[in-house]
C-alpha cells in the first residue's frame, strides 16, 4: 500500500485486478475440467444416503446410475459431462468381491473416501478391516461417526475416543456427524461444514477443491474452505519486507478467489465487475478495516509515520493481507447470493465484519500458543 489519496489508490487496485484477471483465465478453466470421484462407503445402516443428501442434495433413489453400476455399488454423475462421479457403496471388502469392471474402474480412480460409521452400533472388526484395506489405496479417507445425536451428550467424548481407537483413526481424520438427526434433538444436520472443510483441504492438493465445491448443496459452506485457503496464501504473500511488493500477488489471489466463488455459484463475472468489487472494498476510506489497516501499517513502520522492527512489519502486513482476502471472499459470497443487488455500504459491512473476525481469530490463536 501507499499513502496515496483514495482515488489514486482505487486506480492502482483496478490496474492490479485487471492484470490478475488475464492470469487467472487458464487456471479457472483447468480447475473445472478436472475429473473427480468421491466415494461414500459404509454399511447400509450407517447413513451414507443421508450424508450424500446433506452435502450434495442428491437422492440416490431418484437418479439413474451410470452403466456398469450394480445394486451394491451405485455410481451417479453430478455433471452432464460425467467428470464428477459420486459412489455409494457398502464395505470395501464386499465392493471388491461384487463389482463389475466399470464400477471397479471408478473405484480405482477415487480421489477421496468418506467412510460412514453408525455410532449407534459402535465400530466393528469388519469396519476396521475395511478401513485398513481402503488406506492401502493411498487415498485420503475421512471417517464420519454418524448419528452422534443418538449418543447421550455426556457420553459422546469418551465414545468418540474409544471408537477412533478401535478403528485406528487419528482425530484429524474424523468428524462427528448426524446427517439426518432427530428433529427434536437437532434442527439441522450436524458436522456437514466440517466434512466439507476436510474434503476441500484434501482436494486442494490435487487442484480439485473448486470442482468439489461447485457441486455442493450449501454454496456458502462450499466457499468457506476456498476462502480460508486464499486468506492463508495471501498472508504468506503479505509477509514481504518490501513495501508494496505484495500488491500484485495478493490482488491476484483475491481476483482468483472472486472468480472461484462465482464459478461455485454457477455464475460468470467480467473483469470490470471483479475490479469494481475490489476497488469498492479495498480503496482507502475513512472507516472500517481498510482504515484500521492503514493505521496499523503506519504504526509498524511500513508507511510514513513510524519505523519499527522488521518482524513487526511482517506480522502487520501478513495479518492485513490475510484478513482483507478473507473479507473479500465473504463479501463476494453475499453479493452473489443477493443476486448482485447488495449495496456498496452493505458490501463493505460484510467485508469489515469478516476481516476483523479473521484478524481477531488469528491473534487469539497466537495468544493461546
Image (cartoon, grey):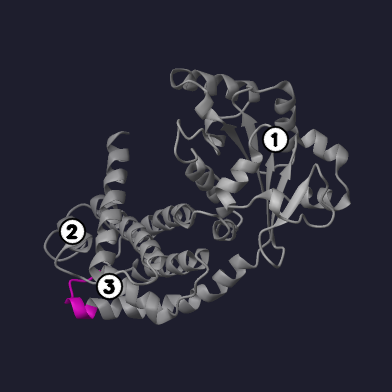
What residue span does the magenta drawing correspond to? 1-8
Q: Relative to the observer, which residue lies in front, 20 or 270?
A: 270
Which residue sits at x=63%, y=52%? 58
Specify which label sits upstream in the sequence, 1 or 2: 1
Which residue sits at x=27%, y=68%? 282
Which residue sits at x=28%, y=49%? 357
Q: Label 1 belongs to which residue?
A: 42
Q: Position of residue 2 (x, y in %)?
A: 22, 71
Q: Label 2 belongs to which residue?
A: 292
Residue farthest to the left, as pictured: 305
Which residue sits at x=13%, y=59%? 306
Instruction: Estimate the spatial distance between the alpha carbons at disc 1 and disc 2, rounded to whole Å.
Output: 50 Å
Look at the image and say whether residue 27 sits in the magenta stretch.
no
Q: Is residue 340 left or right of residue 169?
A: left
Q: Position of residue 369 (x, y in %)?
A: 32, 34
Check the picture and name the quadrant holding the N terminus. Answer: bottom left
Q: Position of residue 101 (x, y in %)?
A: 88, 51
Asked if 369 appears above or below 20 in the picture, the reply is above
Determine whether label 1 and label 2 are within 8 Å by CB: no
Q: Relative to the observer, which residue lies in front, 54 or 196?
A: 54
Instruction: Estimate the spatial distance between the alpha carbons at disc 3 and disc 2, rounded to whole Å.
Output: 16 Å
Specify which label sits upstream in the sequence, 3 or 1: 1
Q: Is residue 87 left or right of residue 262?
A: right
Q: Is label 1 in a helix, a strand or a loop?
A: loop
Q: Label 3 belongs to which residue?
A: 280
> Given this view, does label 1 or label 2 mark the residue nearer the observer?
1
Q: Is residue 217 visible?
A: yes
Amino acid at each position: 500500500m501507499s499513502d496515496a489519496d483514495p482515488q489514486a489508490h482505487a486506480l492502482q487496485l483496478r490496474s492490479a485486478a485487471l492484470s490478475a484477471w488475464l492470469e487467472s483465465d487458464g487456471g479457472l478453466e483447468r480447475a473445472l475440467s478436472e475429473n473427480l470421484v468421491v466415494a461414500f462407503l459404509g454399511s447400509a445402516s450407517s447413513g451414507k444416503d443421508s450424508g450424500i443428501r446433506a452435502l450434495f442434495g442428491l437422492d440416490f433413489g431418484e437418479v439413474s446410475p451410470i452403466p456398469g453400476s450394480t445394486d451394491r455399488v451405485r455410481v451417479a454423475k453430478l455433471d452432464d459431462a460425467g467428470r464428477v462421479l459420486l459412489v455409494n457403496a457398502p464395505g470395501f471388502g464386499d465392493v471388491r468381491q461384487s463389482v463389475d469392471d466399470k464400477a471397479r474402474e471408478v473405484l480405482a480412480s477415487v480421489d477421496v473416501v468418506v467412510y460412514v460409521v453408525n455410532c449407534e452400533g459402535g465400530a466393528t472388526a469388519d469396519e476396521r478391516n475395511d478401513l485398513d484395506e481402503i488406506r492401502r489405496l493411498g487415498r485420503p479417507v475421512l471417517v464420519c461417526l454418524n448419528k452422534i445425536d443418538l449418543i447421550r451428550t455426556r457420553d459422546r467424548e469418551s465414545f468418540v475416543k474409544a471408537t477412533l481407537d478401535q478403528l485406528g483413526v487419528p482425530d484429524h481424520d474424523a468428524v462427528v456427524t448426524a446427517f439426518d438427526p432427530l428433529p427434536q434433538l437437532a434442527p439441522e444436520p450436524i458436522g456437514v461444514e466440517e466434512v466439507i472443510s476436510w474434503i476441500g483441504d484434501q482436494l486442494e492438493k490435487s487442484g480439485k477443491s473448486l470442482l468439489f465445491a461447485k457441486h455442493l448443496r450449501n454454496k456458502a459452506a462450499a466457499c468457506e474452505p476456498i476462502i480460508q485457503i486464499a486468506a492463508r496464501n495471501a498472508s504468506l504473500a503479505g509477509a514481504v519486507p518490501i513495501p508494496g511488493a505484495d500488491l500484485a500477488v495478493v490482488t491476484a489471489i483475491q481476483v482468483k478467489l472472486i472468480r472461484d466463488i462465482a464459478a461455485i455459484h454457477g455464475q460468470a463475472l467480467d473483469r470490470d465487475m471483479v475490479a469494481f468489487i475490489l476497488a469498492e472494498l479495498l480503496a482507502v476510506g475513512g472507516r472500517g478495516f481498510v482504515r484500521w489497516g492503514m493505521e496499523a501499517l503506519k504504526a509498524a513502520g511500513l508507511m510514513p509515520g513510524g519505523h519499527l522492527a522488521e518482524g513487526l512489519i511482517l506480522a502487520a502486513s501478513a495479518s492485513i493481507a490475510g484478513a482483507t482476502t478473507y473479507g473479500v471472499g465473504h463479501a463476494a459470497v453475499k453479493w452473489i447470493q443477493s443476486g448482485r443487488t447488495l449495496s456498496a455500504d452493505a458490501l463493505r459491512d460484510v467485508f469489515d465484519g469478516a476481516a476483523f473476525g479473521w484478524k481477531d481469530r488469528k491473534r487469539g490463536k497466537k495468544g493461546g500458543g
